Amino acid sequence: MSSKSRFLKAISVTEFTGVLDGVDIVAPGKERLPLANLVGRVLSDDVWSDIDVPSFPKSSVDGYALKARSTFGANEGKPVSCRVVGTVEMGRPPPAAVAGEADCMYVPTGGPVPEGADAVVKVEFTRATGTGGDELLVFQAVVPGDGVVAAGSDIRKGGMLLRKGSHVTSPRAGVLAAAGVTSAWAFKRVRVGLFSTGNEIVEPGKPLGAGKIYDVNSTTLAAMLESAGCAVTFHGILADEMAALERAFMTILDQSDAVICTGGTSKGRGDLMPSVIAQNPATTLQVHGVRVKPGKPIIMAIVGGKPVFVLPGNPVSAAMTVSRLVRPALRRWNHLPPERRVAIKARVTERVYSEFGRLELKPAVLDRGADGSWSAVPASKGSETITTLIDADGYFEIPENVEIVERDTVVDVIPFS
């Protein structure tokens, strides 16, 4: 496909998604990470267990370990008598085996079952008698295996714990810990170089002169990109000067697996990023413009084999385009599973007007009524207003061919992740 074929020609969201679906970045490799750093990462290799879990037969109840056959026939009216030969303490091996036919030994929940015992009777079905409680009446019969968790019943030695490609969640990290795993191989995170452009942009904390605004996008987008599994490096605010912008862009590209910047996407005299990308001989694909609101002037290019996104400078536009258009691809490149954001059906509280020919992403506040149904209160501010997303719980989509969404129309509100 020609690098000029899609330049300055708005395409549909479906077409844009199709373009991204065909893009794969060079795999960044893998790294061995300690267990504490594995949550949120994706395994690059299978992980196997070196031990049985549990590594010993343990009791699932507080009770007495014994030979099950010694209780056969026991009931509330006709208990059987056993001899208490010891007590198991947590974290220590049993003091002796249950050798005699009528021997028993107290075992707490989770404690090791002594050799010779094949069942544990619950303490509530027993009563201690005799001098010093060394005799026990058992009022319930048990069968072999009752009250016992067999060694290796949870995890077998040599068994697979997690497969390659598994997303390590907190519970999955717990499984690794249970098997004594201290580290594992994981895919390296995609390195995203992030920067802002614009002579009017100022780093937060610095003096704000006339005509200047603070950089909102770097903070917002860095958090969104990191939540998509990326390793983000912010390269600062670049001025709208062609030669300097070209040099900085190539340096950032060289240090990154993907590049994202905000500002300079339109056709104004100060919007230089389209020219920086179009004139680069390493550019093989360009999309400049997607029929979406907000976010129409988004640029996506492949430069030197690496994906480059130039997002609109308006904070809401930048955030919404990342959420709807860019994050799915970033998650895929990071080997993460697709996001499972379940849409909430809600009735729109007021009539909403939309621009024909563009898919609109309309932020909304969700409100739940006494009957359990949801209402969607559309955001009243535009993409140029920073506070638009402060209270929004998600957004609903208005198709390209719809100009009016009537009040009480049921829409699918997609929660923000």
Image (spheres, rainbow, N blue to C red):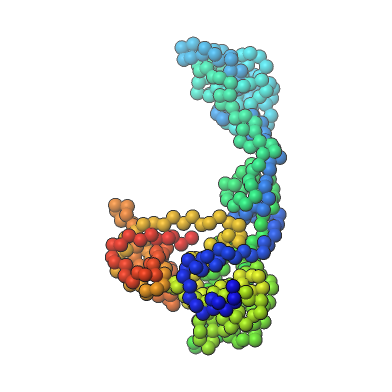
233 shown above or below 79: below
* Quarter occupied by the N terminus: bottom right
| Nearest the eye: 222 or 269 | 269
In this rendering, does residue 127 appear at all?
no
Residue in the picture at 41% in, 69% down: 359
Q: Could you tell whether 313 is left or right of 410 in the image?
A: right
Q: Name above or below for residue 32 compared with residue 196.
A: above
- In this rendering, the answer to whether 136 lies above or below 397 is above
**302 left or right, relative to 357:** right
Q: Quadrant of residue 191?
A: bottom right
| Image coords of residue 262 (percent x, y) | 54, 76
The front one of 156 and 174 is 156
Give me the residue at 65% from left, 50% from top.
164
Q: Decide if residue 125 is in sight here.
A: yes
- At 37% from the left and 74% from the top, the residue drawn is 356
* Left or right of residue 314: residue 32: right
